[in-house]
Amino acid sequence: MKKMTDKNLHEAFAGESQAHMKYMNFSEQARKDGFPNVGKLFLAVSFAEQVHASNHLKVLGELKSTKENLEAAVGGENFEVEEMYPAYDAVAKVQDEKDAQRSIRYAVEAEKIHAKMYSDAKKSVETGKDISIKSVHICKVCGFTHYDSAPDKCPVCGAPGTAFVEF
């Protein structure tokens, strides 16, 4: 692929991915505000944006085997923990942005766990086996991730176990 097209598709992937997430959040807010059909519209268009992003990812050749996808995921999580978030946190501290610091801390703690989970999953996949889990539980407040059952209390943010979503 030519450099300019590659760059453009990477930028389009980022933009469509952001739109997908933004519209998902807009959907949730519309429902909370008493506008369920506006929420439905945001959710539907969010899915369309996901389709666009997925198409770009495929054309870019970045959707690969599960093992390769896990390697990429581990690399991405480690980059966030080791480089990206420490730099962002330093700026937030200098600017005394407490909410940003908390949001970054929550993300870093979750990303560390994600990297370990992906790394362990990669080891299983390399032996031809799926990981052995019943479910995955995510804290809606901070993103802490736990296998099989939600803890009574989130170890990162202190949210109750009822704040976890099961997958």
Image (spheres, rainbow, N blue to C red):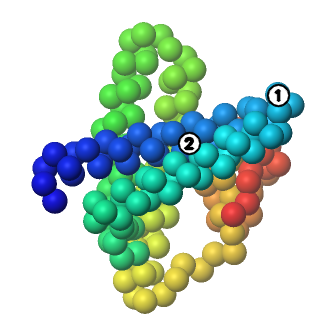
Quadrant, the C terminus: bottom right
Q: Is residue 1 shown left or right of residue 13?
A: left
- Which quadrant would residue 156 be assigned to in this image? top right
Q: Position of residue 141 (x, y in %)?
A: 68, 38
Q: How busy is the neighbourhood of tag 1: few (under 14 within 10 Å), some, or many (20 plus)?
A: few
Q: Is residue 25 shown left or right of residue 78?
A: right
Q: State whether residue 18 appears in this view.
A: yes
Q: Amino acid at mark 1?
A: Asp
Q: Amino acid at mark 2?
A: Met
According to the image, label 2 marks what residue? 21
The residue at 61%/39% (across/down) is 23
Q: How busy is the neighbourhood of tag 2: few (under 14 within 10 Å), some, or many (20 plus)?
A: some
Foreground residue among 116 and 138: 138
Foreground residue among 124 and 30: 30
According to the image, label 1 marks what residue? 33
The residue at 75%/39% (across/down) is 39
